[in-house]
Amino acid sequence: MNNLVFQKDRELDLIAVGRLGVDLNANEIHRPMEETLTFTKYLGGSPANIAVAISRLGLKAGFIGRVADDQLGRFITNYLKDNNIDSSSVVIDKSGAKTGLAFTEIKSPTDCSILMYRSDAVDLRLEVGDIKEEYIKNSKAILISGTALAASPSREACFAAVELARKNKTVVFFDIDYRPYTWKSVEETAIYYSLLAEKCDVIIGTREEFDMLEMFSNPGNKDDFVTAKKWFDFNAKIMVIKHGKEGSYAYTLERDKFTGSVFPVIPVKTFGAGDSYAGGFIYGLMQGYDPGKAMEIGAASASIVVSSHSCSDAMPGIDKIRRFIDQYDGEKAYDVENI
C-alpha cells in the first residue's frame, strides 16, 4: 500500500494542468530533420500526454488549460473528447496566441531531438480566473507540469490550483518536466519549482532536475535520500527520482525505499517515456499499489511508448501493460505492436 489518501466521492480521478500542444513527429526516421519531408500530427505536451495515459488506463481524467481559437486548438479539444478527457475547463483563448509546436527529429533510436515553436504560446496564457474551485474539489488529484510555471499568468494559475487542491484534500502530483528553452534562467526555474514543490504530495523528476531544485539549498548534493528528506519536511509523501537507464527509486515518508523495474527495449525514439511513466505510476498509486508496483506499471508503459512512433496515440491500456510485463523475456528487441 501507499500513504496517499484519495477522496472516494469524486467524479474525476485526475486533473492535469498546463501545456496542451501539438507534436509533429518525423515520418522519415533515421535521418536529420533537414531531410525530413513529412510529419504526423499528434496531441502533445507532457500534462496532455499524462491525461491521455490516465484515460487509457480506465480512469477519468480532466484538464485545465488554454488552447488557441483556431484549427490546432480545435484539433486538441477534439482529441481530448475522443479520448474521454473532460475539457470543460479548457478555455478557448481569444488573444491571438498560438499553439506550441514540437517538431521531432529521429536520427536513430538514441539520437533524437525536438525543435520547439513556443513564442507567445497559448498554454502560458492560463489565468487564475480559469481555475475553478468546484472543478478541483470534484477530483481526487491534480497534476501540475513544471513547464506551466515558466511564465505569468500561467505561473500564478498553477499556484492557485495547488492552494485550492490542498484546501479540498485533493492530492497534488508535481511532474518537474524541465524544459530549459521555456525559462529565462536556471535560477528562476529553481526558485519557482522549489516554491511549488513545498506544497505537493508526490514529486516526480530526474536526478538532474532535483539537482536544479536544490541549487540553493543543497548545492552539489547527489544523495537521493537527502533530496527526499528535504521535501518530506514540507508536504511530500512520495518522491520518485529517476536515473535514466539505471532505473528509478521511490522514497516514502515512512523511510521506505523502492527500486523501480527496468524493461530495456530497442526504441523508435527517446521522447514520451517520462509522460507514459508518470501516467502508469499515478494509475498504480490510485489503485492502492505500493510505489514499487506502481513504478513497474510506469516502466512498462514507458517501454511500450518509446517503441512506438507517437507519444499520445501509443499510450497503452492496463491489459496491454500486463501482457508486456508477463511476456517480457529480457531481450532488448521487443515487438510491442503484437502484444
Image (cartoon, grey):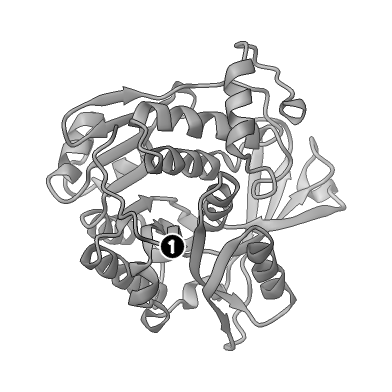
Q: Nearer the viewer, residue 170 or 115?
A: 170
Find residue 73 and report its horizontal and vertical position in percent.
Answer: 67, 74
Tell me what residue is drawn at x 57 percent, y 88 percent. Answer: 95
Q: Residue 33 vs residue 73: left or right?
A: right
Q: Nearer the viewer, residue 303 or 151?
A: 303
Tell me what residue is drawn at x 50 percent, y 21 percent. Answer: 262
State whether residue 210 appears in this view.
yes
Find residue 32 and report its horizontal and vertical position in percent.
Answer: 77, 43
Find residue 4 and report its horizontal and vertical position in percent.
Answer: 26, 44
Q: Quadrant of the N terminus?
A: top left
Q: Quadrant of the C terminus?
A: top right
Q: Residue furthest bottom?
A: 94
Does residue 334 lie above or below 179 as drawn?
above
Q: Secondary structure at mark 1?
A: loop
Find residue 239 and report its horizontal and vertical position in percent.
Answer: 29, 39
Which residue lies under the disc numbered 1?
11
Looking at the rendered structure, the number of numbered marks drawn on it comes to 1
Does residue 214 lie above or below 329 as drawn?
below
State whether residue 102 appears in this view.
no
Q: Residue 10 vs residue 102: left or right?
A: left
